[in-house]
Every structure is written in structure tokens, then in C-alpha cells.
Image: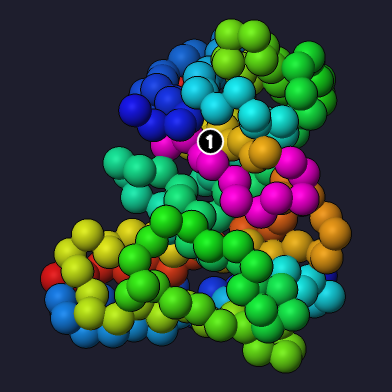
Amino acid sequence: QKEVEQDPGPLSVPEGAIVSLNCTYSNSAFQYFMWYRQYSRKGPELLMYTYSSGNKEDGRFTAQVDKSSKYISLFIRDSQPSDSATYLCAMSLSGGYQKVTFGTGTKLQVIP
Amino acid sequence: KAGVTQTPRYLIKTRGQQVTLSCSPISGHRSVSWYQQTPGQGLQFLFEYFSETQRNKGNFPGRFSGRQFSNSRSEMNVSTLELGDSALYLCASKLPGQGAYEQYFGPGTRLTVT
């Protein structure tokens, strides 16, 4: 079993929909939780990160961490065609620890 | 400010050969990490270099090696290539002391082994 599980999709939604992306993990020692967006032929770019449990909001994006369930989510409100990309969740034991464990990514397509 | 650059962007090699990939970090960034990305395994951490020293290493065989130069540029080498080494190889850089979540990724080198 992988340390981080993420549904690969693809996930196809109409423009304006609310998108929910999720990951589960097995290592309860993870403290930092990140979401990256990766466009085709590009490297991943950080969208948001959260320390420990709780919610964090940035514009149309909301990240949630539930450590008791070992479950993290990314919500995208009012989705746009420009949001079409692969979304990767990632986790690390501490902020300074460079060994980041990634999910395999969920491919999202937002249809105009 | 220029981003992380990787060369070459695409590479085709034959099984058994070796390959060297190059990464130039963002100016001032002295920490460089390498990752392998495949559809089945996702992104997997290879190693991290800081000030020409390897600081962390992932679970990859010894055929995968790297180094960092005094100007912070980094190279990774894969010897005796196998078909399973076909992947996107990404490097990421960050400032010393910054968290892993503050690293910036390059566009990657797409390696195909035939």
C-alpha cells in the first residue's frame, strides 16, 4: 500500500462547478500538507500548504486537513477552464525536511 | 527572476547506456532536490544537495547519483539505464532554511529509454 493515495481521475466538470480533490495517507507523523498544480509539460507549482489540521483558504481554493481520518482535501470554487491540470497532494514530516511524499495526481478537466 | 532551468528537455537513450541531466537553480537558491515522476508511482524523491553535499536520499538504487557544483548547479546521472527509468525527472530549488513547501520546480527532463 502506498503511503499517500490519490484517485488519478480523470475528473471532468462543467465550468463554474465546485471541485473536490482528495488524498488519504497512512503515516500519522506527517505534519505539512501541500497541494500542487501541474500543467502539461510543466513542473508542479505550489498552490497551498497547511500545517497540521484545519482549513486554509486562498481565493477560490480551500485546503482541508483531517489528521484524525488521515484525509486531506482541496476544493476549487467557480472552476475555470484554466484550472484544467493535474493536481498533486504532497506531505512531509516537517517543514525543513526535504523528503516530500507525493500522491500520483488527479487530472482535472473543466469544460467551458 | 529566471526560474529553475533543466537541460535537456527531452532525451532518448538505449537500455544499458548512461545519462546526465542538468539543473540550474534560481539565483541564490543553494538547495537542489531531484524527483522522478512516472504515471504509476507519481513523484518520488531522489536526493537533495546543499552546498555541494548530499543531505537526503530517497529509496533508489545506486545507479542514480548526483552532484552539485560550487555555483549551485546540479547534475544527476543514471548509469546502466533500464526501461523502467523512463520518466520525467524534475529538479526543484529553494533558499537555505526554507521549508520543502517553498521549493520551485523546473519544467523537467523527459527521459525515454528504448
Residue at 33% x, 75% y is: B63
Looking at the magenta stretch, what is its main secondary structure? loop
Give the chain of mark 1. A
Whether residue A109 is situated above or below residue A55 in the rendered picture? below
- Left/right placement of residue B25 relative to residue A85 reads right
Choose top left, top right, bottom left or bottom right for residue B72. bottom right
In this view, the residue in front, B60 or B44, is B60
In this view, the residue in front, B55 or B32, is B55
Q: Is residue B2 visible?
A: no
Amino acid type of disc 1?
Answer: Leu
Q: Which residues are magenta?
A: A94-109
Image coordinates for residue B111, horizontal then vertical, percent: 32, 69
Image coordinates for residue B67, horizontal then vertical, percent: 56, 83
Residue at 54% x, 41% y is: A101
Q: Which residue is mark 1?
A: A88
- Indicate whether residue B66 is drawn in magenta: no
In this view, the residue in front, A40 or A98, is A98
Image coordinates for residue A26, horizontal then vertical, percent: 50, 23
Quick one: label 1, few (<14), some, or many (20+) residues within 10 Å?
Answer: many
User: Which element is circle 1 on?
Assistant: strand
Q: Residue furthest bottom?
A: B70
